[in-house]
Image (spheres, rainbow, N blue to C red):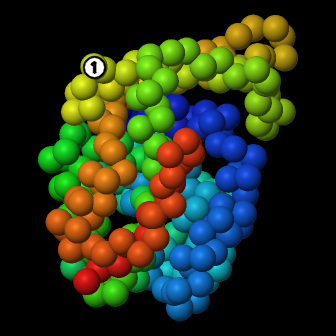
Amino acid sequence: MTSYNELGEVYEWLISDAKLSPVEFAASFDDALGLLPSDAHVLDCSCGTGQLSVGLAIRGMEVAATDASEVMVRRTQELAQEFGTLVRTLRAAWEELPDHFDDGTFDAIFCVGNSLHHADGASGRLGALQSMARLLRRGGRLVLTSRAWELVRARGSRLDIADRLVRRNGVDAVVIYRWEIAPHWEDEHHIEIAIAQLDGDGAVRVRSELLSCWPYRNDELAAELRLVGLRTEVNTFSLGAENYTVVASKV
Ligand SMILES: C[S@@+](CC[C@H](N)C(=O)[O-])C[C@H]1O[C@@H](n2cnc3c(N)ncnc32)[C@H](O)[C@@H]1O
């Protein structure tokens, strides 16, 4: 079960320092953003706590931010208010997006930060990519970032306990990832994430969630993008690298 409603409340302990600032998060996509008009109409379709959406709005773009999690959508609204930016927020899973937006609405769609693996298997992933492709105008671009599951699966099931505390809002926390790697690529995998916050009075408060994911190989993703009518322009995948970025345009 993947809801992010528990993790959403403490998600900043999972975000790297570089992604905490909306301006810096958006700047990490400068190459793709340079191809867009400054008032581009963009969708962040797994917006999380909203740092990218707000960063894009600060640049003057017309931003819609969607997510399957109520908590994430609320947090994105709150961040947009904090920065005095206008972001249209909506709770919608990827397959529901065509119910809310016309085909060809967006110049660019972002699906970033290890989100797509939450789509339910190959058919769920294809459905999600189909929704995104429909909503792009011809020539519009999908910008997707992904974990390299080739590397994750090669490491097998394991426990990752961070060797340093993460401090957010004056509170320190230990972050733990438990990776449950299934025998076959197509099986449901799990990542259990726990954030153990150390309160000032010495108490430990743990928030955790068991997330489902369905891994995919980089070449499978490339084939699925072709199937939904997107032509890959950039694919930074390389063996041994933890993450990669794909930019694909609507043919
Ligand atoms: C790892 S977080 C990434 C959030 C954000 N993009 C970032 O980079 O910080 C994955 C996000 O995907 C969302 N998500 C999971 N399944 C989804 C679905 N079927 N449709 C839309 N969003 C989904 C989660 O709620 C969560 O906010």
Towards the viewer: 228 or 110: 228
Q: Is residue 53 above or below residue 122?
A: below
Q: Position of residue 1 (x, y in %)?
A: 31, 27
Residue drawn at the location 63% of the way across and 36% of the way down: 14
The reply, left or right, for residue 41 in relation to residue 168 is left
Q: Nearer the viewer, residue 22 or 69?
A: 22
| Dot 1 amino acid type | Pro
Q: Quadrant of residue 140?
A: bottom left
From the viewer's perspective, is 8 left or right of 23? left
Q: Residue at x 30, y 60 (%)?
A: 222
Q: Quadrant of the C terminus?
A: bottom left
Q: Position of residue 90 (x, y in %)?
A: 38, 60
Q: Is residue 208 left or right of residue 127?
A: right
User: Is 71 located above or below residue 45 in the figure?
Assistant: above
Which residue is labeled 1 in the image?
A: 183
- Is residue 188 depicted above or below 45 in this figure? above
How packed mark 1 is, by other alpha carbons closer than 10 Å (few <14, some 14-19, many 20 or more), is few
Q: Residue at x 55, y 15 (%)?
A: 159
Q: How far across and how far down the image is residue 100, in percent?
A: 25, 68
Q: Residue furthest front?
A: 239
Report the side of 82 relative to 172 (left or right).
Answer: left
Q: How many marks?
A: 1
Q: Nearer the viewer, residue 70 or 57?
A: 57
Q: Residue at x 23, y 68 (%)?
A: 226
Is disc 1's CB within 8 Å of ligand 1?
no
Q: Is residue 5 in view?
A: no
Q: Is residue 58 above or below residue 40?
A: above
Residue 116 seen by the camera: yes
Element at label 1: loop
Residue 236 in the image, given as x and y percentages of width and height? 51, 61
